[in-house]
Image (spheres, rainbow, N blue to C red):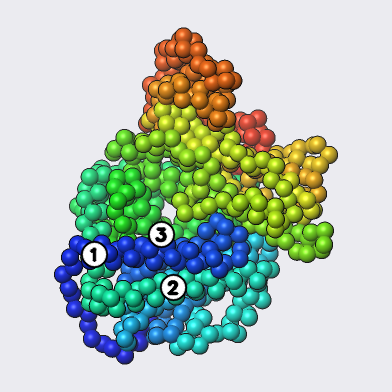
Amino acid sequence: MPATIVQTNHTPFEKKVIDPVTLDIIENALRNARIEMDATLVRTAMSPGIREQGDAFPLIADHTGKMIVGQFGSFIGGFLDNWDGTLEDGDMIFLSDPYSCAGAVSHSNDWLVLLPVFKDGRLIAYTSMFGHQSDIGGKVVGSMPINARSIFEEGVRIPPVKIWKKGEYNEDLMKLVMHQTRKPDWCQADLNALIASCRVAARRVIEMAARFGDDVYISATQELLARNHRAMKSLIAMAIGEEPVSFEDYICDDGMGSGPYKIKCTMWREGEKVVLDFAGTDPQSQASINFYLNENMFKMFFGIYMIMVFDPQILFNDGFYDLIDVRIPDGSLLKPKFPAALSGRTHALGRIFDILGGLLGQKTPEFLNAAGFSSSPHLFYSGNDKKGDWFQLFQIGFGGIPGRPMGDGPDGHSLWPGFTNVPNEFLERYFPLLIERYETEPDSGGAGLHRGGNGIHMTYRFLASGTISIHDDRWFVPPWGVNGGEPGKRARKVLEKADGTAQIIGNKVEDVHVDEGDQLHFITWGGGGWGDPLDRDPALVGKEITQGLVTVEGARAYGVIAGPDGAVDQAATEALRAKVRAERPALELFNYGPAVEQLRADCVAETGLPAPIQPRWATLEAAE
């Protein structure tokens, strides 16, 4: 049964004509309210993942549940259709179980609160915020076990419940939930921060409605949705063809020795509607790399990508959803069946953006981006310090952003534009470690007219024995280049022991013991290059040598001969470029690097790690 909205005032809202000035004021007030949600969160949360890195996502929706401002799109419509309960003034919903909300949050570490906003007895809006909790219990520190076979191994699962009911706080529920986590102080503070953020936004909405009138405010939100619909309809007609185009990419492995896992999407236009079909995507994994992709979330991803590439001035919201038909096969990597594990879904989430770039650019190569969003590298470090106190770090790393039509990809940037790095001073102050190195990895960005962004080389020196876990990808299948650009370099991780010995470790490893004095070299992937590297300005390549972004040897990928001081030998450069142009084959739209089987054959020599083996699906094993 659908949810029951309890209102004491049943007067319908009257549609008003909104003048452009009023619409602009309300639009920007909503944008500011969203920013204030983030600011409130940062000031009141405790965990580094939320307070320092901003791993939380706000939402302000209209009275029907459609997102007006936010980032991930709205889950509220699906929630209202499937939750057998009431919503009334003074209520607030709390949840974390992806299977109870059709993937609106995609793993149980994300805690979500939803606040219905009432004014004068009528529901006028919803505010919501979810954020990643650093620990929710489960079998490993950080609650993201690589080898989990079901979601039951990943920590506490919270179905939709009322954390506030008619203004009364459910304290017993919170005691029960916090009892499951290794860091109840962080989790309680972070949850309070999510709640405070929603309440701040609710106050701003009520203030706007009081200032302009309820009918004007509601009508303005509907016009913002309609305006977005008109803009997206034009973009779809311009950028999407009726002839189907397909693209596929791979998650390197599952952390248990199998891989790569294919994600495939086919796109075409039917009239004014675009269809995105994930048929051909591999079946769900037995490990935790599955990504329960909510259809509305993917519609928002698609819309964000379209808007950012073709018209960044558009305010993205839920107004265009009826223009998109998303088809995801049940039992696939992107729609696994309960109780499949989900905690390592970040790699597939990142790969979705690479796939969108590959799809949308095939009709308009001038707008094509290379690969490089790819993943969201995680490091976990835990143990007892020399005083015997428990410490626990969860940190998100950054990689190289792809080369783009308008220029180079940023070096060492986050998958999400709103994320920031944890300051090294914070890490050294609150955890037993030193940051020996924090710099871009030269030559890791793919060569091109527009260079792919370099990855990060971060070296941690551990000051207390403990355990580390790593979640990363793009170590086996490189980020591809486009329009003649070269692929980016792959990720790698090296553990250097205090005695000077070193070993290459995997990019998905768990419970690796480290001793005092050991160092971890955490090196992330670079973005793919865009355009012919031989067209890049040699003087710019020389300058990047002096900046440590490109090496003298790496400059040869651009056909540039230069010294350590960046001085370019023009004659030698022209000769090298002429030779390369004469000998190389015709440039292709996509440069994927070697085929998968060649990557397998060369894996040990190139990465120091054994190649992943082809996954075996449970259905095939049963048939055999």
Q: Which residue is mark 1?
A: 23
Q: Which residue is mark 3?
A: 71
Residue for point 41% across, 28% down: 449
532 relative to 161 in the view: left or right = left
Q: Quadrant of residue 155?
A: bottom right
291 relative to 296 in the view: left or right = right
Q: Residues within 10 Å of mark 3 (few under 14, many from 20)?
A: many
Residue 29 in the image, given as x and y percentages of width and height: 33, 65
Amino acid type shown at disc 2: Val
Is label 3 in a helix, a strand or a loop?
A: loop
Q: Which residue is mark 2?
A: 200
Amino acid type shown at disc 3: Gln
Mark 3 vs mark 2, foreground winner is 2
Chain-order first, disc 1 or disc 3: 1
5 relative to 284 in the view: left or right = left
Q: Would you say residue 321 is visible in this rendering?
A: yes
Q: Quadrant of residue 59?
A: bottom left
